[in-house]
Amino acid sequence: MRRARAKLDAVREMLNMKRRWHLVFSAAALLAFPAQAWANAGTPLMWAGMLHLVVGNALIGLLEGALLGWLFGAPRGRAMSTMILANYISAWLGGLMIRGAIVDRLPMDLDNGWMWFWVMVAVTYGITLALEWPFVAWCFREAGDWLGRSLRSSIVVQGISYILLFGWYWAASGTSLYTQMDIVPASELDLPESVGVYYIRPADGSVCRRELAGGIEQKVFDLQSADGDDRLFVRRNSADTNRWDLMARRETDDRRQPELIEVRTNLAGQAAADLRMTENGPPGTWFSMGEAPRIGSAIHSPWEFRAGFWPVEGLRGHQKATGERVHFSYETPFGAWTVRNAVHLPSDIVLFQLGENQICGFDPGARRVALLWHGRGPVAVIEEGLDGRRVER
């Protein structure tokens, strides 16, 4: 009778082990493949982050606890419950540290963003080790060599779970700006020399002007802009519809009633008015997306471009004659940049604002992107024809 009971207990233990490992492997599979179909209700990265914080930490804790028991002999029940708690604490506390104390303070732009991404991958792993090691050590508190075993097991177990978690976030991120485009200096883009660009300088909120293909920065108006949603735009001159007025849209305390300020009037030449102009001017920078307006010879181009709302939607281009399509975006746990204020220029160059204060150019044929200078709310103007001469009256 005792032998029968012993055999029955052994069978039950084997079944329980199978159930636990089935749960562990199911958790690993879930963490490896986020559902891209959720993009219509946000972005895949947003959903990946929410699932990780709410339920993913419990699954990771089960996996890590099972690995501690299987590979290093820690009591399985204690290890699983302890590592579930450890993952919730490290995810929430580490997330606040990474976002608020580190990422927001990095001098990150297009030229160094990819380097900082991989730096933060390493930093995040280090933070995870530091925050969760005390919990791993607790699991081995009754062992003789608890310190050595906890250090070794923490590196191995955290390494395994971090690889799975990295794959989860990688699949949900938008990295094509760096993985499918070439980031080059501005000198390597075929920038049209006939275009001048007005923009808001981040340092003091003044309106400045530059030649797109080179030249020095010239201050043209003391706007005193302090809001990231402020931008410039052009509209037809009321007295002469063949000329343009350069305007600034500046936010006020009442977001529904922005302040419209004349920066320069009576500009002769060509410009691209915003496609969604209202009596209050165009929308602010945050909602300046959609189809990119055309200027100069770009009105005859087979290319068409569109900026998406979410960072992962980025900038899309379609060559109607050949069917070629191009797309890039940047949205990761360590930084995300929207594409705003896009305009289609001659030579099929797209001028756009990336993130809060990067004015960039894109060549779809060569798949090259370049940071031109820092600024926001850019407006491109071909003043007095396409030969580079400018006339203002």
Image: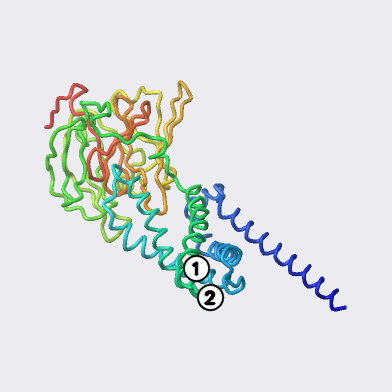
Looking at the image, the residue that sits furthest to the front is: 144
Q: Is residue 333 left or right of residue 232?
A: right
How far apart are labels 1 and 2 at the CA level? Answer: 8 Å
Q: Residue at x 13, y 32 (%)?
A: 392
Q: Which residue is mark 1?
A: 149
As helix, strand or loop, the secondary structure at mark 2 comes to loop
Question: Which of the image's four quarters has the C terminus?
Answer: top left
Label 1 or label 2, whichever comes before in sequence order: 2
Residue 260 is left or right of residue 123, and the answer is left
Residue 131 placed where, x, y %?
42, 68
**Which residue is outermost to the right?**
1
Say what secondary structure mark 1 lies in: helix
Q: Residue at x 49, y 68 (%)?
A: 149
In the image, is 390 to the left or to the right of 126?
Answer: left
The image's mark for residue 143 is 2
Say if mark 1 contacts mark 2, CB within 8 Å: yes
Between 22 and 353, which is closer to the camera in this rendering?
Answer: 22
Q: Nearer the viewer, residue 169 or 256?
A: 169
Identified at 49% across, 73% down, the residue is 146
**Whether residue 44 is situated above or below residue 195 in the rendered picture:** below
Residue type, numbered disc 1 = Arg
Q: Residue at x 20, y 23 (%)?
A: 385
Q: Position of residue 361 (x, y in %)?
A: 29, 35
Q: Position of residue 349 (x, y in %)?
A: 31, 29
The residue closer to the viewer here, 166 or 330, is 166
Dot 2 alpha-carbon crowd within 10 angstroms: few under 14, some 14 to 19, many 20 or more: some
Q: Position of residue 197 (x, y in %)?
A: 21, 36
Q: Quadrant of residue 327?
A: top left
Quarter occupied by the N terminus: bottom right
Q: Residues within 10 Å of mark 1 (few under 14, many from 20)?
A: some
- Seen in the picture, residue 164 relative to 215 is either above or below; the reply is below
